[in-house]
Image (tube, rainbow, N blue to C red):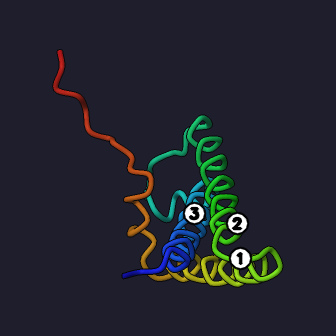
């Protein structure tokens, strides 16, 4: 049986990764890396920033559920460093793999 603490920490890691990826996609340069010629809409930029911030705060919350405050903050900071590195390396080597986090539909609708 998997411990609840392990699930909290795994959730915190995923949440930190998603948070940093969404924050990166909110930047024009990274958006163009991922989506090539598509333009980032102003409304999408705000939504991506909000989701990114909530992802990082959610990660902190899950760390606080997993352990006492002093240890949770230490683990959270380490998760932030690791997640930021993973997102940076993904943007450097395989930026288009981040498309799944915020797809852009450029096809025309079939409705008349």
Could you say which quadrant of the image residue 12 lies in?
bottom right
Mark 2 and mark 3 lie on one chain; the one further toward the N terminus is 3
In this view, the residue in front, 24 or 37, is 24
> What separation in Å lies between label 2 and label 3 (alpha carbons)?
25 Å
Residue drawn at x 38%, y 50% is 103
Residue drawn at x 57%, y 58% is 22
In which quadrant is the N terminus drawn? bottom left
In this view, the residue in front, 97 or 108, is 97
SS state under label 3: helix
Q: Residue furthest right?
A: 70
- Labels 1, 3: front one: 1
Q: Residue 52 appears at what percent x and percent y?
A: 63, 56
Residue with the mark numbered 1: 76
Residue drawn at x 43%, y 57% is 101
How dense is the environment of label 3, judged by Cα within 10 Å: few (below 14), some, or many (20 and up)?
some
> What separation in Å lies between label 1 and label 2 (alpha carbons)?
6 Å
Residue with the mark numbered 2: 60
Judge from the rendering whether residue 12 lies leftward or rightward of residue 53; answer left or right: left
How dense is the environment of label 1, judged by Cα within 10 Å: few (below 14), some, or many (20 and up)?
many
- Labels 2, 3: front one: 2
- The vertical placement of 8 against 75, above or below, is above
SS state under label 1: helix
Could you say which quadrant of the image residue 57 lies in?
bottom right
Q: Residue 97 appears at what percent x and percent y?
A: 38, 69
């Amino acid at each position: 049986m998997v411990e609840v603490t392990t699930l909290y920490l795994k959730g915190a890691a995923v949440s930190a990764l998603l948070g940093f990826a969404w924050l990166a996609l909110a930047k024009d340069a990274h958006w163009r890396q991922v989506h090539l010629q598509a333009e980032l809409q102003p409304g999408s930029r705000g939504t991506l920033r909000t989701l990114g911030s909530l992802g990082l705060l959610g990660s902190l919350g899950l760390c606080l559920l997993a352990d006492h405050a002093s240890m949770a903050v230490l683990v959270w900071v380490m998760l932030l460093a690791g997640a930021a590195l993973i997102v940076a390396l993904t943007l450097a080597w395989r930026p288009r793999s981040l498309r799944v986090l915020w797809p852009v539909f450029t096809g025309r609708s079939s409705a008349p």
